[in-house]
Image (cartoon, rainbow, N blue to C red):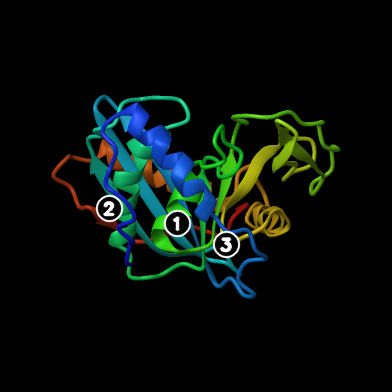
C-alpha cells in the first residue's frame, strides 16, 4: 500500500515536538467509512536493540485473518514519552508497505487525540496513510475520567485540560476498561462502536491481540527470517 511522504524524519526531540504541533491541525474527525470490510491491527514489540512491527488485517464481519506482515528493524529515534511514534513508525510503515490489502480502518495499540499535543501514533499513521485510524490504549496517557459502569459497552469521557480527548470503554463486563481516541477520519462515536465490535470475547480487540502475538513471534525468529508472514490459522475469536 502507498504511504505519503509528508515530512522529513526528525533527528531530535525538538524537531519531533515541532512536527507534532504542525501536523495535528491536519487531523480530521468525521463519522468514518459507511462500510468497514477489513480492519488492520498494528502493534510493536521490543527486544534489545530491535523493534518488531506487525500488521494483521482481519475480515471485519468474521474477525478472521486476511493478511499479515511484519518488519524487524533497529529504531533510530530515542525513547521519549509522547514521541513514541517516531521510534515505532518506521517499522510500522515498512510492514504496511508489504500489504497487498488496503484496510478500511487502522487500529493502533496506542493513542490518537488522547495525547499531550493531541497527536499520538494513531493520528500520525492516519495522516501518513490517508486511512481512517483509531487508537486503543491499554492504559491512559493523559487526562481524567470517571470509571464507567461494570457492563460491557459502558463508557465515560476522557478529559484533558477541559477538552474531551477520548473515551474510557468497558469492552467486557467486569474487566478493566480500554482507552480509545480518534486517530484520523473517524469520530468518537465510530471509535467506540468499532472497539466493541472488535472485542467480542476479550478486553483487547482482536486486532491488537493478533498483532501483538505476531510481533512477539517475529522477535523470536532468526534475524534473517521472512519480512512478511501468512495469516495465522486459528479458530474464530473466543474459542
Image quadrant assignment for residue 175:
top right
Residue 135 in percent (x, y) is at 56, 46
Task: Give the distance between the C-alpha atoms of the residues marked 2 and 3, in whole angstroms.
Answer: 22 Å
Label 2 vs label 3, nearer the camera: 3
Q: Determine whether the residue tagged by mark 2 lies in a helix, strand or loop.
A: helix
Disc 1 to disc 3: CB gap under 8 Å: no
Residue carrying label 1: 127
- Quadrant location of the N terminus? bottom left
**Viewer-proximal residue among 91 and 234:** 91
Image-based side of 162 in relation to 133, left or right: right
**Residue at left 66%, top 55%?**
191
**Residue at left 47%, top 30%?**
82
Residue 21 in percent (x, y) is at 48, 40
**Viewer-proximal residue among 181 and 21:** 21
Image-based side of 196 in relation to 57, left or right: right
Task: Give the distance between the C-alpha atoms of the residues marked 1 and 3, in whole angstroms.
Answer: 9 Å
Residue carrying label 3: 185
Image-based side of 183 in relation to 99, left or right: right
Residue 80 in percent (x, y) is at 40, 24
Q: Determine whether the residue tagged by mark 3 lies in a helix, strand or loop.
A: loop
Residue 176 in percent (x, y) is at 71, 33
Q: Residues within 10 Å of mark 1 (few under 14, many from 20)?
A: many
Residue carrying label 2: 94
**Residue at left 60%, top 53%?**
239
Chain-order first, disc 2 or disc 3: 2
Q: Residues within 10 Å of mark 2 (few under 14, many from 20)?
A: many
Amino acid at each position: 500500500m502507498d504511504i505519503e511522504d509528508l515530512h522529513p524524519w526528525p533527528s531530535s526531540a525538538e524537531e519531533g515536538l515541532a512536527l507534532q504541533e504542525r501536523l495535528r491541525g491536519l487531523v480530521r474527525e468525521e463519522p468514518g467509512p459507511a462500510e468497514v470490510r477489513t480492519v488492520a491491527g498494528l502493534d510493536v514489540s521490543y527486544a534489545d536493540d530491535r523493534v518488531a512491527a506487525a500488521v494483521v488485517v482481519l475480515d471485519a464481519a468474521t474477525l478472521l485473518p486476511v493478511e499479515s506482515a511484519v518488519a524487524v528493524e533497529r529504531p533510530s529515534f530515542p525513547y521519549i514519552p509522547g514521541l513514541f511514534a517516531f521510534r515505532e513508525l518506521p517499522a510500522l510503515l515498512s510492514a504496511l508497505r508489504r500489504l497487498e490489502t488496503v484496510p478500511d480502518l487502522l487500529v493502533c495499540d496506542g493513542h490518537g487525540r488522547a495525547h499531550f499535543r493531541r497527536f499520538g501514533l494513531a493520528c500520525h499513521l492516519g495522516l501518513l496513510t490517508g486511512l481512517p485510524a483509531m487508537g486503543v490504549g491499554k492504559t491512559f496517557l493523559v487526562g481524567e475520567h470517571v470509571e464507567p459502569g461494570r457492563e460491557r459497552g459502558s463508557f465515560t469521557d476522557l478529559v484533558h485540560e477541559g477538552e474531551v480527548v477520548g473515551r474510557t470503554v468497558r469492552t467486557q463486563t467486569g474487566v478493566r476498561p480500554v482507552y480509545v481516541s480518534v486517530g484520523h477520519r473517524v469520530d468518537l462515536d465510530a471509535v467506540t462502536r468499532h472497539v466493541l465490535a472488535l472485542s467480542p470475547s476479550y478486553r483487547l480487540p482482536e486486532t491488537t491481540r493478533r498483532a501483538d502475538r505476531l510481533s512477539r513471534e517475529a522477535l523470536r525468529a532468526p534475524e534473517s527470517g521472512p519480512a512478511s508472514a501468512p495469516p495465522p490459522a486459528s479458530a474464530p475469536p473466543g474459542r
